[in-house]
Image (spheres, rainbow, N blue to C red):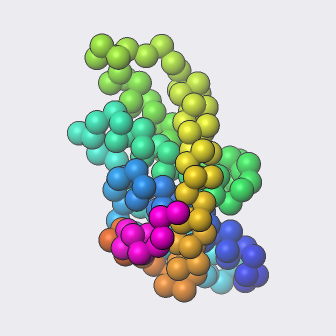
Amino acid sequence: MNPENKKRHALHEAGHSTIAIMLNVLFTTTDIYDREVDIHGTTKIIVREDMTIDQKRNAVYAMLAGGFATGEDASNEKGVAKDYQEARNIIANIIMKGITSDTATMLNIEDYLKECEGETKKLVVKYNKFIEAVADELLIKRELSRDQVEEFINKMPKD
Ligand SMILES: [Zn+2]
């Protein structure tokens, strides 16, 4: 498997997991595996019904961060399309809750998604150094728990 492609996958998963740590989003593990024909990576972000709207929105950012972390506009790529589907599901849930509270929103899912994309882009730029480092660590370790990613980030210099 060519190393460039592997690095791209590592960056994608590191985008999810690094932004998740920075925004206090829960996930179980982040990983990349070489397979016969391709590379497979997952970051298992946890979204629960009882989370606050802020927590859910942060989960959307972490969900979208994979695609932006590779520096490509690749929302139609297979892995990224799945992330977008997940993000839309969370947003639909946020909007439904919003309507029943005083912070009623008239935004539809695609408008909300666009806003989230803008925020995610900023976050990925802001934390790029950490994403790069987590990606390199992922290339070595193959799988990291949330605690391991958090510990790794905490050991890095903050500026
Ligand atoms: Zn992804």
Q: Residue at x 59, y 27 (%)?
A: 110
Q: Residue at x 37, y 40 (%)?
A: 56
Magenta residues, dominant SS class: helix
Residue lying furthest bottom in this view? Answer: 140
Seen in the picture, residue 141 relative to 146 is either above or below; the reply is: below
Please tell me how many numbered marks the rendered image carries: 0
Q: Nearer the viewer, residue 155 or 132?
A: 155
Residue 1 x, y percent position in the rendering: 72, 83
Q: Which residues are magenta?
A: 150-159
Residue 33 appears in the picture as rendered: no
Q: Residue at x 52, y 63 (%)?
A: 159
**Magenta residue check for 151:** yes
Q: Nearer the viewer, residue 27 or 129?
A: 129
Q: Nearer the viewer, residue 7 or 152?
A: 152
Residue lying furthest left in this view? Answer: 50
Q: Residue at x 58, y 52 (%)?
A: 126
Left or right side of 19 for 74: right
**Magenta residue check for 88:** no
Seen in the picture, residue 30 relative to 117 is either above or below; the reply is: below
Seen in the picture, residue 125 relative to 99 is either above or below; the reply is: below
Left or right side of 86 for 29: left
Seen in the picture, residue 51 relative to 40 is either above or below; the reply is: above
Left or right side of 144 for 33: right
Q: Quadrant of residue 28?
A: bottom left
Residue 7 appears in the picture as rendered: yes
Q: Quadrant of residue 91?
A: top left
Residue 153 x, y percent position in the rendering: 44, 69
Residue lying furthest front in this view? Answer: 159
Residue 60 x, y percent position in the rendering: 47, 43
